[in-house]
Image (cartoon, helix red, strand yellow):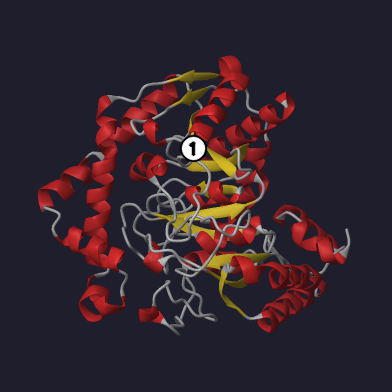
């Protein structure tokens, strides 16, 4: 492959070539930087990028490999990090002028694990304000007049545009799955608590998840394998054996997976392209998919999720509201003010429903199904840069803390991608990735 095309490499391919000495990290990073210089004036995915520092990191990685010392699975591979994760060597400004110039004293858990795996933090990508709804500057790589989604807008756009093979984001409602769908890449939201969030902006302990972006499912598996695990600073993680995501994703399912097609109570929000695309998808899957109606209690999950998110955001952003409300967007101020009015009884009721609802889904999986098939968003990325799109097709799964993945399998009439969402059982993340690979392969065979 020509040096100028190295930015097209998957993370797995890049790591292998660097390990074998066929490509240097410096060459790969230089190709990514060239791609950024070529495309980012229009896309604007980056909040902080220092090319000289990026190349210095790459040269250090190459020297380490040549020394003969042990190297990690992501050695020399550049990764983009959403600007809500603390980085001790770069600013972390959280999408708000309130934190302009803020440089933390230590890395977040995710960044520390990336560095331990040998990855290079190429730079910080654009987030919406405090990872909420007010858009940043980023545009959709497929069409600059359309939103890239949010809140992990820069991370999704950077991967989709070929600027970097991997990126990290977050999801509290639909902030990973939605931008992945809009930008036409793979986005993965793991089981709640699988990947530690210490050193990440906290908006809602109950709902916040780390999210992953790549162009292939194999790259998602590679990244998840390095980031999952226990961290004593995140009380929602727990000690667990290392999960072999890459091996699991690459394995053939023992039996052809069975999918449950779930429209959810908000199916009326799906646009014509999504309805038509899912109709074709269901037909192509034949006897490997069945339409399943949700149990009645699931219909209330959207209001329960809203109560939790508003109350916890109001508590976590209390200082910012009290000291700097004039520097907050109107939308975020209203969100915090609504959160301050949530009644304790409603908040506690919403929390108490997560367990029973998750158990109901667990029974559904154990009876028959490997994954739930559902839209990632109502349709393709909407036109306009004053919105990040509708996250409602992600709400139920985020509320329950279930793993979800968006795959770029459909296309709207205007040529923009439409994401297909697969949702798995809690703690069955590796199985979900294996099912996602099966689905992608089966559809490729039917074309």
Q: Nearer the viewer, residue 179 or 225?
A: 179
* Callout 1 secondary element: loop
Residue drawn at (39%, 36%), measured in percent from left and top?
Answer: 269
Q: Residue at x 31, y 52 (%)?
A: 206
x and y percentages locating residue 166 in the rendered image: 63, 58
Relative to 426, does residue 186 appear above or below in the rendering? below
Comparing 330 with 18, the one in front is: 330
**Where residue 375 sits in the image (x, y, percent)?**
48, 36
The C terminus lies in which quarter of the figure?
top right
Picture residue at 54% right of the left edge, 42% below the top: 406
Q: Is residue 68 above or below residue 361?
A: below
The residue under label 1 is: 428
In this rendering, the count of numbered labels is: 1
Label 1 neighbour load within 10 Å: few <14, some 14-19, many 20+: some
Is residue 240 something one can see in this rendering? yes
Residue 393 at x, y = what percent?
A: 41, 40
Q: Which quarter of the figure has residue 70?
A: bottom right
Q: In this rendering, would 40 be left or right of 267?
A: right
- As rendered, which of 250 and 396 lies closer to the eye? 396
Position of residue 443 in the picture relative to residue 267 (left or right): right
Picture quarter with the N terminus:
bottom right
* Residue ranking furthest to the top: 287
Where residue 325 sits, quadrant-wise, is: bottom left
Residue 150 horizontal/vertical position (percent): 46, 57
Residue 120 visible, this orientation:
no
Q: Residue at x 54, y 22 (%)?
A: 258
């Amino acid at each position: 492959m020509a040096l100028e095309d190295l930015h097209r490499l998957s993370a797995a391919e890049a790591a292998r070539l660097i390990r074998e000495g066929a490509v240097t990290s410096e060459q790969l990073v230089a190709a990514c930087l060239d791609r950024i210089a070529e495309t980012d004036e229009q896309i604007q995915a980056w909040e902080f990028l220092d090319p000289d520092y990026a190349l210095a990191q790459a040269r250090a990685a190459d020297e380490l490999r040549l020394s003969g010392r042990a190297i990690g699975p992501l050695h020399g591979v550049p990764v983009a990090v959403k600007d809500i994760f603390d980085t001790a060597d770069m600013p972390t400004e959280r999408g708000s002028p309130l934190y302009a110039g803020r440089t933390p004293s230590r890395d977040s858990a995710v960044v520390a694990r990336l560095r331990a795996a040998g990855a290079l933090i190429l730079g910080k990508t654009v987030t919406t304000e405090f990872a909420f709804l007010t858009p940043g500057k980023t545009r959709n790589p497929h069409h600059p007049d359309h939103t890239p989604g949010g809140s992990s807008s820069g991370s999704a756009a950077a991967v989709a545009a070929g600027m970097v093979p991997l990126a990290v984001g977050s999801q509290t409602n639909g902030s990973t799955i939605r931008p992945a769908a809009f930008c036409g890449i793979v986005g993965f939201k793991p089981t709640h608590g699988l990947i530690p969030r210490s050193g990440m902006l906290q908006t809602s302990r109950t709902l916040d998840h780390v999210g992953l972006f790549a162009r292939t499912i194999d790259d998602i598996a590679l990244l998840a394998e390095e980031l999952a695990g226990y961290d004593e600073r995140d009380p929602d993680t727990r000690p667990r054996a290392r999960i072999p995501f890459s091996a699991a994703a690459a394995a053939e399912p023992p039996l052809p997976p069975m999918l449950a097609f779930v429209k959810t109570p908000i199916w009326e929000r799906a646009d014509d392209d999504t309805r038509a695309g899912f109709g074709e998808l269901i037909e192509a899957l034949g006897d490997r998919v069945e339409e399943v109606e949700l149990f009645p209690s699931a219909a209330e999950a959207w209001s329960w999720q809203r109560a939790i998110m508003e109350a916890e955001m109001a508590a976590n952003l209390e200082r910012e509201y009290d000291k700097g409300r004039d520097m907050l967007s109107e939308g975020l101020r209203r969100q915090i003010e609504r959160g301050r009015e949530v009644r304790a009884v409603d908040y506690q009721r919403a929390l108490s429903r997560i367990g029973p609802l998750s158990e109901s889904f667990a029974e559904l999986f154990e009876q028959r199904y490997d994954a739930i098939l559902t839209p990632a968003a109502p349709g393709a990325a909407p036109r306009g840069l004053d919105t990040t799109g509708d996250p409602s097709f992600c709400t139920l799964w985020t509320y329950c803390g279930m793993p979800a993945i968006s795959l770029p399998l459909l296309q709207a009439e205007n040529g923009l991608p439409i994401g297909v969402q697969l949702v798995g059982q809690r703690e069955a993340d590796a199985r979900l990735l294996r099912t996602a690979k099966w689905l992608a392969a089966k559809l490729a065979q039917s074309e």
